[in-house]
Image (cartoon, coloured by chain):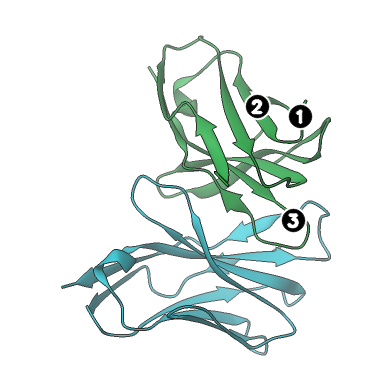
Amino acid sequence: NAGVTQTPKFRVLKTGQSMTLLCAQDMNHEYMYWYRQDPGMGLRLIHYSVGEGTTAKGEVPDGYNVSRLKKQNFLLGLESAAPSQTSVYFCASMKTGTAQYFGPGTRLTVL
Amino acid sequence: GESVGLHLPTLSVQEGDNSIINCAYSNSASDYFIWYKQESGKGPQFIIDIRSNMDKRQGQRVTVLLNKTVKHLSLQIAATQPGDSAVYFCAVVYAGGTSYGKLTFGQGTILTVHP
């Protein structure tokens, strides 16, 4: 099993550009999550999904959208990137009653 | 609300020593506890977990202890190796809160192992 994978690993955007981060998991987990990690802030939940076709807002959802069209994939979109969205983004997945398993991260810089 | 904190932000040990990393939580209804390891430039990696009906659980070179009376969690690493150098943080799940497995994270302890 590859576990949780994320693409791309790195990305540089200009302010106002858009992009989509892809998360894929091959563990047949129901739950999927998107976090951002900033120095001194720890992991903060952006959006999550409890199953295919469902999404919900986390702690810091503004400026992001998500979609879960397939159980194994969870997409995070930035419609109009801002410098405040410079961060490392982690995806995670979970089976009911177990721990969340994280991907390797995407390092995003918005200029 | 829930808060999770770590007593020691940094810990330096010699190779071969045992390491103990601590975590305090505030919500007595928390029922699932997880330790993660995060190496520089990588995602958090699951180490070990424990449920509230247990007070000790062992893995390979790691032991988690849970003291619900004082709301304290610790991670013990035996015979610490340089490869154990990383940030360690605890995460807590409060079963009575949400239905989506919300994790409340501690801020992390930096473990440095000197050869």
Q: Earlier in the sequence, mark 1 or mark 2?
A: 1
Residue B52 figure quarter: bottom right
Residue B39 figure quarter: bottom left
| Relative depth, front residue between A76 and B26 | A76
Q: Which residue is mark 1?
A: A70
> Residue A79: in sight, yes or no?
yes
The amino acid on which the numbered mark 1 sits, given as a three-letter code, is: Lys
Instruction: Classify mark 2: residues with Cα within 10 Å, few (<14), some (14-19) or many (20+).
Output: some
Q: Which residue is mark 3?
A: B101
Q: Residue at x 49, y 19 (%)?
A: A82
The amino acid on which the numbered mark 2 sits, given as a three-letter code, is: Leu
Q: Which residue is mark 2?
A: A75
In the rendered structure, the residue with mark 3 lies on which chain?
B
Which numbered mark, 3 or 2, is in the foreground of this view?
Answer: 2
Instruction: Classify mark 1: residues with Cα within 10 Å, few (<14), some (14-19) or many (20+).
Output: few
Q: Are marks 3 and 1 in contact (CB under 8 Å)?
A: no
Marks 3 and 1, how far apart at CA:
20 Å
B74 relative position to B10: left or right: right
Q: Residue B113: x, y in percent? A: 24, 71
Q: Residue B57: x, y in percent? A: 59, 84
Q: Residue at x 43, y 65 (%)?
A: B88
In the rendered structure, the residue with mark 2 lies on which chain?
A
Chain colored green? A
Marks 3 and 2, how far apart at CA:
19 Å
The amino acid on which the numbered mark 3 sits, given as a three-letter code, is: Gly
Residue A56 figure quarter: top right
Element at label 1: loop
Asked if residue B92 is positioned above or below residue A108 in the image, the reply reads below
Q: Residue at x 67, y 86 (%)?
A: B68
In the rendered structure, the residue with mark 1 lies on which chain?
A
Which numbered mark, 3 or 1, is in the foreground of this view?
Answer: 1
Which numbered mark, 1 or 2, is in the foreground of this view?
Answer: 1
